């Protein structure tokens, strides 16, 4: 559906003249409502309503099937109201504004019931509930190709975006044509860059009549968080002719992620709705640059849907210098060596990196060359923002189940790094502190998930430039032949520049005899940790005892570790909370009896060493879903309700064989 606002000046009605009494006004409202109802009954699939009349001004809302209908429907509606309008203006509006107009019409008694109208068009879900992660915009008109190409160049995306712009501007949609030949995936780590590329793409498509609507809605999905799939589909249902962008923030791509199943389930749900509305709604997926597994899962789940990828590129030394040179020319300032010298040989830079370098140089240049009296003055914003740890990632970390000690250490670490940044900006000379960490905890305690959030926290607080996570193990670092290992390690450090390099089970590097390639890997890691401490954090992760022994045997590594972050095993209550979260992400509920059964089982499991923590919860729920399927299939299909399909009962809960075997006997509810 498309939504429009029609405004004009009434030529034949003095509505709120001072001589008009309330009775006349009520009678006129009644006539407008009756005439509107009669008109809308004849206009099946479209809807027009008055929501504002003051003096000679009238405003009307339109809910229509397509763009052409927007202007065509107004004359007939005005005839039904017996109104003559001059200077009519019709503009597209967002759903939210249309809903506000409809509610205003309800209050003024120009329509019978706003909720009934929305329900008639299948939009009731959107009006009854709200969720924070949604934003709708109206794209500006006019998108000359030259301007769109320049934006692609400004954001180092010309390699993938310009060829697609060529295809878009090559030909407009034929009259009466339907559907979208392709949908899109934008991959970059910076949300602002994602949105610029999204707007550039959508404006170009609208300019060439590949989109009927200038409306574009951004939806953010965090697997494992609270989210309504009913509202998600309602948005698609309401967005025919427009563009929906889905920003998917993977919790973790590692195999032992607590929320891995929830992530896959969320991707499948998104893709099922994308495919269902593929011809009516254009979808643009927004993913981080390094989310290779997530990208693969989307491709697997979107079989039959063609995707064009738009990817932000990284600039090498020459390209980065040219980027800064061009920015300086646009400001009519000569790029000096202080600016160009900030580009290091062999490094790669994102647009975010380069713009930050340029802005810092501009600020410093302004204060040092034009107004030197302000050189040591920081902005009020900087003073205030540096006091606190900000961003959405820190909130997500705090909302995670348990992990009290880990949360406390990470918050202290971020504040410590922010303080070092203040020292540097004030010109107080200090050695650059080590930013590297050790995560110590058993499997399934969300170490990788927290590492990913930590990278985002550092990025959102200006302490890392990209904020992505690169996860490696022994097989990713140790080469098969002499000379390969050092080169491989350096490549991984380069890949992680601006983010976090997460080395899982780091002690496995020394599980071999002295002089092995593992020793070469460790020596290179120590060297790179020292050389790249400006914009990279290394996190060594593994079991507590093994990590302690590993660091004791490698003093070079130990001396470069700033923070030791403990990840305690979850207790039974925390495991129940995790079970509830995973259940919601899978679209199932747990009855009170089922939760009590889980609590009993978790109390038993917590007494067993290395029971698996979050991974164990996932296994229990997977087994419960299989037991539920077996139970439900024994019921007459006609008698199964939707609630029964979603509900896990106590009888579905079982203890995995691994727990029973470890105990050598059956305890409690185990079968």
Image (cartoon, grey):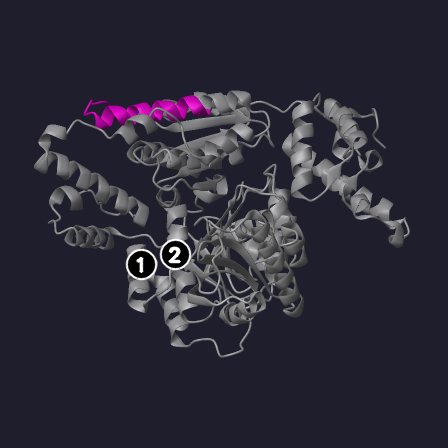
- Residue 165 visible to an observer of this rendering: yes
Q: CA distance from mark 2 to mark 1?
A: 8 Å
Give residue 349's position: percent from left, percent from top: 30, 48
Q: Is residue 667 left or right of residue 114?
A: right
Give residue 545's position: percent from left, percent from top: 54, 22
Occupied quadrant, residue 40: bottom right
Give residue 567's position: percent from left, percent from top: 55, 24
Which residue corresponds to the image point at 29% horizontal and 53% vertical from the top-left? Answer: 315
**Residue bounds of the magenta highlight:** 410-431
**Mark 1 residue element:** helix
Along the viewing direction, whichever of 462 and 147 lies nearer the viewer: 147
Q: Is residue 239 left or right of residue 164?
A: right
Which residue corresponds to the image point at 27% horizontal and 42% vertical from the top-left? Answer: 356
Which residue corresponds to the image point at 42% horizontal and 27% vertical from the top-left? Answer: 437
Residue identifier under label 1: 151
- 430 in magenta: yes
Earlier residue among tags 2 and 1: 1
**Mark 2 residue element:** helix
Residue identifier under label 2: 197
In the depicted structure, whether residue 224 falls above or below residue 301: above
Give residue 383's position: percent from left, percent from top: 29, 26
Q: Are marks 2 and 1 in contact (CB under 8 Å)?
A: yes
Q: Is residue 526 left or right of residue 366?
A: right
- In the picture, which quadrant includes the C terminus? top right
């Amino acid at each position: 559906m498309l939504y429009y606002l029609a405004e004009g000046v009434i030529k034949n009605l003095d509505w709120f003249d001072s001589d008009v009494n309330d009775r006349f006004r009520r009678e006129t409202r009644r006539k407008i409502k009756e005439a509107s109802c009669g008109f809308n009954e004849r206009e099946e699939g479209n809807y027009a309503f008055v929501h504002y009349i003051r003096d000679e001004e009238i405003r009307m809302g339109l809910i229509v099937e397509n763009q052409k209908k927007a202007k065509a429907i107004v004359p007939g509606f005005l005839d039904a109201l017996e109104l003559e309008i001059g200077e009519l203006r019709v503009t597209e509006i967002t759903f939210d504004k249309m809903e506000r107009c409809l509610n205003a019409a309800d209050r003024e008694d120009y329509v019978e019931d706003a909720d009934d109208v929305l329900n008639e068009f299948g939009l009731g879900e959107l009006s009854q509930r709200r969720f924070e992660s949604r934003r709708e915009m109206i794209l500006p008109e006019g998108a000359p190709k030259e301007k769109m190409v320049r934006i692609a160049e400004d954001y180092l995306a010309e390699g993938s975006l310009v060829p697609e712009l060529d295809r878009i501007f090559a030909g407009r949609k034929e009259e009466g044509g339907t559907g979208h030949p392709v949908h899109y995936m934008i991959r970059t780590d910076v949300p602002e860059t994602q949105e610029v590329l999204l707007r550039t793409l959508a404006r170009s498509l609208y300019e060439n009549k590949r989109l009927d609507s200038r409306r574009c809605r951004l939806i953010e999905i965090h697997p494992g968080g609270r989210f309504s799939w009913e509202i998600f589909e309602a948005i698609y249902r309401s967005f025919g002719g427009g563009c929906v962008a889905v920003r998917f923030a993977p919790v973790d791509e590692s195999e032992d992620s607590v929320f891995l199943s929830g992530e896959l389930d969320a991707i499948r749900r998104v893709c099922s709705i994308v495919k269902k509305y593929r011809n009516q709604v254009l979808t643009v997926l927004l993913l981080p640059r390094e989310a290779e597994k997530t990208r693969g899962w989307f491709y697997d789940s979107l079989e039959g849907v063609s995707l064009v990828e738009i990817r932000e590129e990284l600039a090498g030394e020459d390209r980065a210098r040219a980027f800064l040179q061009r920015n300086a020319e646009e400001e009519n300032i000569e790029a000096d060596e202080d600016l160009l010298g900030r580009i290091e040989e062999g490094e790669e830079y994102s647009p975010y990196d380069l713009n930050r370098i340029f802005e810092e140089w501009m600020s410093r240049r302004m204060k040092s060359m034009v107004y030197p009296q302000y050189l040591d003055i920081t902005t009020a914003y900087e003073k205030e923002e540096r006091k606190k740890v900000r961003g959405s990632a820190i909130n997500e970390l705090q909302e995670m189940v348990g992990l009290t000690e880990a949360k406390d250490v990470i918050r202290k670490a971020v504040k410590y790094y922010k303080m070092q940044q203040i020292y540097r900006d004030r010109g107080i000379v200090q050695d650059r502190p080590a930013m590297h960490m050790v995560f110590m905890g058993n499997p399934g305690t969300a170490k990788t998930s927290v590492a990913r959030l930590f990278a985002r926290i550092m990025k959102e607080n200006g302490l890392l430039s990209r904020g992505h996570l690169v996860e490696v193990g022994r097989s990713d670092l140790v080469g098969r032949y002499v000379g390969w290992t050092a080169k491989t390690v350096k490549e991984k450090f380069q890949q992680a520049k601006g983010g976090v390099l997460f080395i899982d089970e780091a002690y496995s590097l020394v599980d071999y005899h002295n002089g092995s390639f593992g020793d070469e890997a460790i020596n290179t890691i120590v060297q790179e940790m020292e050389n790249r401490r400006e914009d990279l954090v290394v996190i060594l992760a593994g079991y507590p005892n093994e990590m302690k022994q590993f660091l004791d045997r490698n003093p070079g590594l130990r001396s470069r570790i700033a923070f030791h972050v403990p990840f305690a095993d979850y207790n039974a209550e925390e495991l129940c909370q995790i079970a509830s979260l995973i259940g919601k992400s899978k679209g199932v509920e747990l009855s009170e009896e089922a939760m009590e059964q889980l609590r009993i089982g978790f109390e038993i499991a917590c007494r067993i060493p290395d029971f698996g923590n979050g991974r164990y919860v996932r296994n229990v729920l997977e087994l419960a879903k299989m037991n539920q399927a077996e139970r439900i299939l024994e019921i007459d299909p006609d008698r199964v309700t939707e609630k029964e399909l979603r509900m896990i009962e106590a009888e579905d809960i079982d203890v995995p064989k691994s727990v029973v075997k470890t105990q050598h006997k059956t305890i409690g509810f185990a079968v």
